[in-house]
Image (tube, rainbow, N blue to C red):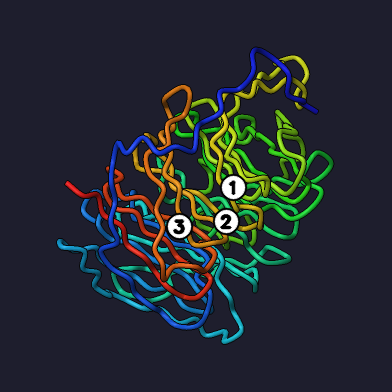
C-alpha cells in the first residue's frame, strides 16, 4: 500500500483570501425541512449548462439559473418509495443525447430519470446497501459508476440497463465507499475512496471488451456476464480518517477527509507490481470547520477552482492550479449556519450554489 513521502514538503495554501473574485449572495431557496445532500450543474450538454438539480428525501428537483440571481423550478420527481433518502445525483445522457438524471440513496436502488419526459427510464437494483455517490463518464456519458455502503463500486450502462463491472473483492474497499470519479482522459481509469481511509485506483483496460459488449447486448440485462474487478492498480493511504470525496485533476488526485483540508497528490504506480507505489503530496487546501463526514467539494468545468462548504455554512473557494494554492474567496452569510453538504460551481465558476442540511439552497454570483 502506498504511503506518502516522495519529493519536497507540500505547498499549503494561506487562508488569507486573495480577493481575486468577489461573490455576493443573489438568492436563497428553501426546499423544505429535509436535508439536501447533493447539488450539480449539467456539464454533459452545452445546451443545459445553466440547469442544476438537487436531491433531498425522496425528491429530485431540477432548476434553471436565470440572470439577475433568479432561480426557476423546472421539474420535481418524487420517488414512489416514501422512505427513500437520496444522497447523490449525476447528469448523464442516452446514446441519442436524451438528458438523464441518475439518483441513488439509502434504498440502494439507482433511478435513471428521463429529464425530457420526467419519467423513470430504468431502475438499477444490485447494490446491497445505500448508494453514496454516482458519477458520469464524460467521454461516454451513458456510462455511470456508483459507490456504495456495500463496499463495492459498480459500472452501469444507462442505455441497456446492464451492470458491466463490479469493483470489489480481495483487493477492494474494506468499508463503505463514499466517493468515486472517472479519469478525465484515460477512459479505463477510476478512483474510489471511503471509510477504510484509502483511495483506490482501478483500471478497466483488461475488461474493456465487456464495456463495448454492453452497448450491443440484446438479451436480458440480468444475463450479461458481469465481471468482478478484484484488484486495484493502486492503493493510497493519504488520510488517517474517512475519505469522503475524490476527484481527478489531470493525472493527479484531489481528495478530502474529515481533517479540514483537501489534498492534491500524485500516485506513483509501479507497473510491475499493481497496488504498490508511492504518493507524492503536492498541495494542501485548508478548509476550517470541515471535520464532519459527507461534505463534498465541486469544481468548475475546467477545474481551475474548487468550492467547498463546511459545517458552519461557510464556503471556501480555492484556486486549484496555482502553487502555493490561492484562496479566491471565503463566503459567509449571517443566516447561513447549517452544514453545507455539497457545492456546485457553474461552467466558468461565476456562480456557486450550495445545498444545506436545513433544506436551503444558496446562490452566490461574482460581482463584476
Residue 364: percent from the left, percent from the top? 31, 57
Relative to 47, residue 193 above or below: above
Relative to 248, residue 80 above or below: below
Q: Quadrant of the N terminus?
A: top right
Q: Earlier in the sequence, mark 2 or mark 1?
A: 1
> For the view shown, which residue lies furthest in the right direction?
170
Rendered image quadrant of residue 303: top left
> Mark 3 and mark 1: span between their CA atoms?
15 Å
Q: Which residue is mark 1?
A: 245
* 347 to the left or right of 292: left
Residue 292: percent from the left, percent from the top? 66, 57
In the depicted view, which residue is nearer to us: 151 or 336?
336
- Residue at 32 percent of width and 62 percent of height: 363
Rendered image quadrant of residue 192: top right
Residue 213: percent from the left, percent from the top? 53, 44
Q: Which residue is mark 3?
A: 90
Q: Earlier in the sequence, mark 3 or mark 1?
A: 3
Q: Is residue 340 visible?
A: yes
Which class describes the residues within 10 Å of circle 2: few (<14), some (14-19), or many (20+)?
many
Helix, strand or loop under label 2? loop
- Residue at 53 percent of width and 71 percent of height: 357
In the depicted view, which residue is nearer to us: 270 or 3?
3
Between disc 2 and disc 1, the foreground one is 2
Q: Which residue is mark 2?
A: 295
Residue 7: percent from the left, percent from the top? 65, 12
Amino acid at each position: 500500500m502506498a504511503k506518502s513521502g516522495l519529493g519536497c514538503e507540500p505547498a499549503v495554501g494561506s487562508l488569507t483570501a486573495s480577493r481575486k473574485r468577489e461573490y455576493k449572495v443573489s438568492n436563497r431557496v428553501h426546499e423544505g425541512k429535509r436535508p439536501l445532500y447533493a447539488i450539480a450543474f449539467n456539464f454533459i450538454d452545452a445546451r443545459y449548462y445553466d440547469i442544476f438539480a438537487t436531491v433531498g428525501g425522496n425528491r429530485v428537483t431540477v432548476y434553471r439559473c436565470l440572470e439577475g440571481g433568479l432561480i426557476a423550478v423546472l421539474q420535481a420527481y418524487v420517488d414512489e418509495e416514501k422512505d427513500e433518502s437520496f444522497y447523490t445525483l449525476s447528469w448523464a445522457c442516452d446514446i441519442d443525447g436524451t438528458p438523464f438524471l441518475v439518483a441513488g440513496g439509502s434504498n440502494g436502488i439507482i433511478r435513471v430519470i428521463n429529464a425530457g419526459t420526467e419519467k423513470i427510464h430504468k431502475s438499477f437494483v444490485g447494490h446491497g446497501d445505500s448508494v453514496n455517490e454516482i458519477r458520469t463518464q464524460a467521454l461516454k456519458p451513458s456510462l455511470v459508476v456508483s459507490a456504495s455502503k456495500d463496499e463495492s463500486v459498480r459500472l452501469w450502462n444507462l442505455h441497456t440497463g446492464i451492470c458491466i463491472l463490479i469493483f470489489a473483492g480481495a483487493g477492494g474497499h474494506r468499508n463503505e465507499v463514499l466517493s468515486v470519479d472517472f479519469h478525465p482522459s484515460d477512459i479505463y481509469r477510476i478512483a474510489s475512496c471511503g471509510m477504510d481511509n484509502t483511495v483506490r485506483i482501478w483500471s478497466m483496460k483488461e475488461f474493456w471488451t465487456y464495456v463495448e459488449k454492453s452497448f450491443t447486448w440484446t438479451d436480458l440485462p440480468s444475463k450479461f456476464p458481469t465481471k468482478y474487478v478484484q484488484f486495484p492498480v493502486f492503493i493510497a493511504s493519504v488520510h488517517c480518517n474517512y475519505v469522503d470525496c475524490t476527484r481527478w485533476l489531470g493525472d493527479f488526485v484531489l481528495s478530502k477527509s474529515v481533517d479540514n483540508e483537501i489534498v492534491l497528490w500524485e500516485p506513483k504506480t509501479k507497473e510491475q507490481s499493481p497496488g504498490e507505489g508511492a504518493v507524492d503530496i503536492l498541495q494542501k487546501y485548508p478548509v476550517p470547520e470541515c471535520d464532519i463526514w459527507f461534505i463534498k467539494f465541486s469544481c468548475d468545468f475546467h477545474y481551475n477552482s474548487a468550492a467547498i462548504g463546511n459545517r458552519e455554512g461557510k464556503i471556501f473557494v480555492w484556486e486549484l492550479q496555482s502553487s502555493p494554492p490561492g484562496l479566491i474567496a471565503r463566503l459567509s452569510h449571517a443566516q447561513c449556519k447549517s452544514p453545507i453538504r455539497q457545492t456546485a460551481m457553474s461552467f466558468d465558476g461565476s456562480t456557486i450554489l450550495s445545498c444545506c442540511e436545513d433544506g436551503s439552497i444558496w446562490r452566490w454570483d461574482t460581482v463584476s
